[in-house]
Image (cartoon, grey):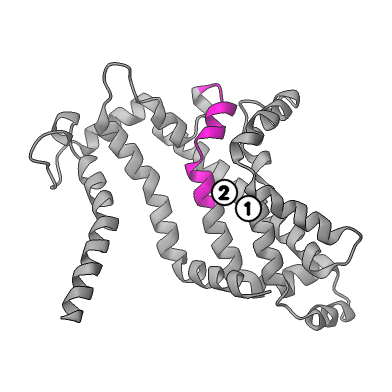
Amino acid sequence: MKGWTLTFTLAVVFGLCVGPFYWLAMAATHSTADIFSWPPKFYPGDQLAANTAQLEESIGLVRVLGNTLYVAVVQTAGAIVVSLLAGYAFAKFSFEGRDLFFVLLLSTLVIPGGVTIIPIFEMMNDLGLIDSYPALILPSLSVPFGIFLMRQSLLAIPDELLDAARVDGAGELRVLWRVVVPVMRPVLAALAVFLFLGAWNDFLWPLIALRTPEMYTLPVALATLQGLARTDFGQVMVGTAISSLPMMILFLVLQRQFISGLLAGATKG
């Protein structure tokens, strides 16, 4: 009896998790009228090509995907570098005010993101960066959670291991690249997934910082499809499905590193 209960529970959970994605995939192949018809059509339709072509015509899908991918990749890579360097400094160097600075850094985790939007906008505007890639990338390079995760993981690396590399003549950057990074790969992979998904799905800040449609990222471009009188939900579903694919692929490819990285970051230090 317990086995059937467990199986039923897992089936319900699986359905709740996978069901919306299946419906999204099926809805992307139907017209707006078919999407809202009754009974629901949970089978493939014949409008996928038409919906995709209309979406390309409406928002410039290829260009928008290129914008989103560029911003997400550069933002993720930059944030990982900053987090690793800062975490390395906090974990392996002694300097005046280190603990105070780290506490202040952690305190920023409880500050709502909306509080900093206006100051960041003013800074980007004063620098003349509004409606540009740097306006999207620069404010996201410093990630307090990433620095915290790197620092906690680096504390588990013995100082003797780093000292041995220094004795052999390695500089700090070489020690970081040759000794620290190979050990930190699972944690770096987990952080990369977090950062990439956050950058890929970011909507509010690109909506505020961008002005011209040529610079739009995918979430902002999809929001423009909502009309006052009528919305083509076939296009919306195609765009949403395309937006979801990189996230699912990234997690499936890196799920082992993602889970082991989270466990390592949670237990070390």
Asked whether residue 67 is drawn in magenta, I would say no
| Amino acid beneath label 2 | Val
Nearer to us in this view, 148 or 243:
148
The vertical placement of 117 against 197, above or below, is above
Residue that protrudes farthest toward the right in the picture:
96
Q: Which mark is residue 2?
A: none
- Image quarter hosting the N terminus: bottom left
Looking at the rendering, which quadrant does residue 206 occupy? top right
Q: Which residues are magenta?
A: 196-212
Mark 1: which secondary structure? helix
81 left or right of 72 in image: right
**Residues at marks 2 and 1, CA–CA distance in whole angstroms:** 6 Å
Mark 2 crowdedness (10 Å alpha carbons): few <14, some 14-19, many ≥20 = some
246 left or right of 105 in image: left
Asked whether residue 207 is drawn in magenta, I would say yes
Seen at 65% across and 26% down, the residue is 130
Nearer to us in this view, 30 or 259:
259
Nearer to us in this view, 230 or 72:
230
Visible residue check, residue 60: no
Looking at the rendering, which quadrant does residue 172 occupy? bottom right
Where does residue 137 sit, x and y in percent of width and height? Answer: 64, 40
Seen at 57% across and 48% down, the residue is 73
Where does residue 96 sit, x and y in percent of width and height? Answer: 92, 60
- To which residue does mark 2 refer? 73
Seen at 14% across and 41% down, the residue is 45
Mark 2: which secondary structure? helix
| Amino acid beneath label 1 | Ala
Nearer to us in this view, 56 or 255:
255
- To which residue does mark 1 refer? 77
User: Mark 2–mark 1 contact, CB under 8 Å?
Assistant: yes
